[in-house]
Amino acid sequence: MRVVVVGAGLAGLAAARELVAAGCTVTVVEKSRGLGGRMAARRIEGTVVDHGLPVLEAPEGGALAGLVGRLAVEDRVRIERPELGPDGAPIGTGAPRWGWGPGMTRLPKAMAENLEVVTGARVAALRAGRDGIEVAQDQGNTLGVADRVIVSAPAPQAADLLEASPEGGERVAALRAVAYAPAVMILAGLRLEAEPEWSAVRPADGPLMRVGIESAKGRPPVDGVVPVVARMTAAASARLMDAADDLALDEALPALAAVLGEAAREPAWSQVKRWRYAVPTRRLDQEVMNPGGSRVILCGDAVAADPGIAAVHETGIWAARRVLGGA
């Protein structure tokens, strides 16, 4: 069986690995140049910052914990410093929290080893073919014919692709009803007098939802500069999503100074990164969204059981098993 997986985020890669292990021929197609989706990292001024998923929580005994225990273990860092809530008390599920020294992309890169992955290619349509589903790019080129297609893209993009397939119908409308909260991320290098004893904090008020210290992931400061990633609240992110970077920084840096001191007002370096599809505000049932006989199978955050990254990973495994089960 030949399967095409659209999207090389955690769910798509999990599906591909499961299918390859079962003997399927699998091609993963990713529109960007990198892997991991929101498990994204960026190299800035000699260091690495995770500007998507800040930490990976893997509940013990789950499929994701097993994956973390097997792959990229030499670069894995267990984050021991606590994350503090608005009241200054530690928060979290109690599950181990992981990062990777070279950046969060280290795990998806390890997952993609021995997989056929095509990057920089956008799937635009899924056409009914005589022998299966023809996977077409936006340039009119074809990626071949597949027996099954797994789509792991965010709901709006999945809806566009499903609508341009033989299997549109009610699933398209359901996907279009899923809205996403955006996220504006502030990346900054700060000359702090001392690093905090926490790995992240969630301010009680202001435009910042979370402030994380990247050196807590085993990345020492470079030339005395501590890398910090601050995520703006959903309201601030929506307001600044399409604004100039200077406007986002003008609002974020004073708030960052309230958390980390006056050094934050004049960072050694700073960048702004935006995620238009950061967090779905509602979720769909994966079983319902993939009725029996579907040749286009949906996975990813829109059909995850809960917001956790472990649940997103599970949707990819579910999708692969639905393909293998033939239902």
Image (tube, rainbow, N blue to C red):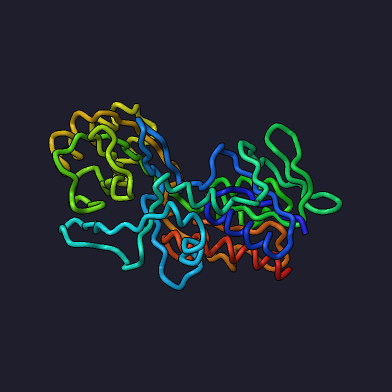
**Residue 285 drawn above or below residue 254:** below
| Residue 178 picture location, percent across and down | 49, 53
In the picture as drawn, the residue positioned furthest to the bottom comes out as 61
The image quadrant where one finds the N terminus is: bottom right
Tell me which residue sits at (24%, 59%) in the image: 82
Quarter where residue 77 is shown: bottom left
Looking at this view, is 311 or 156 the one in front? 311
Looking at this view, is 187 or 202 the one in front? 187
Residue 134 visible, this orientation:
yes
| Residue 55 picture location, percent across and down | 37, 54
Quarter where residue 3 is shown: bottom right
**Residue 121 drawn above or below residue 3:** above
Q: How many marks?
A: 0
Looking at this view, is 123 or 195 the one in front? 195
Looking at this view, is 166 or 184 the one in front? 184
| Residue 269 picture location, percent across and down | 29, 29
Residue 173 visible, this orientation:
no
Instruction: Please indicate whether residue 55 sits to the left or right of residue 295 in the image.
Output: left
Instruction: Please indicate whether residue 227 sits to the left or right of residue 48 in the image.
Output: left
| Residue 314 picture location, percent across and down | 53, 64
The image quadrant where one finds the C terminus is: bottom right
